[in-house]
Amino acid sequence: MANLAPSEPLLKYFRAAEISWKEFSKRYESELYEPAPVDSGNVKSKNHGRKFTLRLIKELARRQPVTLMCSCDPDEKHCHRFLLKRLLESSKV
């Protein structure tokens, strides 16, 4: 579900080493809870319904295995899917 990806600007800042992993993590989580119906910072994907999508995946994960994927290298240690996994395992969603 592409709407759970970090915004294009945020990913660009991190990949250009303009922000740290800690700052990226903080901003990514903030983005997930933005109240705006559409994140205007994204050209390619509009991030509708992030909170609904998080709740849906969390409910599915209670019933069956869920696989989180993205276009990062599988060995990448700093990937948003690890942050997403931690968030889905928490009680915050």
Image (spheres, rainbow, N blue to C red):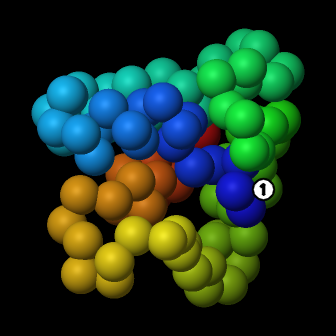
Residue 23 against residue 74 in the figure, above or below: above
Name the amino acid type tagged 1: Leu
Q: In which quadrant is the C terminus drawn?
A: top right
Q: Is residue 85 left or right of residue 64?
A: left
Residue sitting nearer the eye, 48 or 92: 48
- The answer to whether any part of residue 10 appears in the image is yes
Residue 66 drawn above or below residue 40: below
Question: Residue at the spot x=42%, y=32% of the render?
Answer: 10
Question: In the rendered image, which residue does mark 1 sit on?
Answer: 56
Classify residue 7 as left or right of residue 1.
Answer: left
In the foreground, 67 or 10: 10
Q: Is residue 26 above or below residue 48?
A: above
Question: Residue 67 location, x and y as percent?
Answer: 57, 80
Q: Give percent across and percent down for residue 43.
A: 72, 35
Q: Residue at x 65, y 71 (%)?
A: 62
User: Residue 16: horizontal and vertical position, in percent?
Assistant: 24, 40
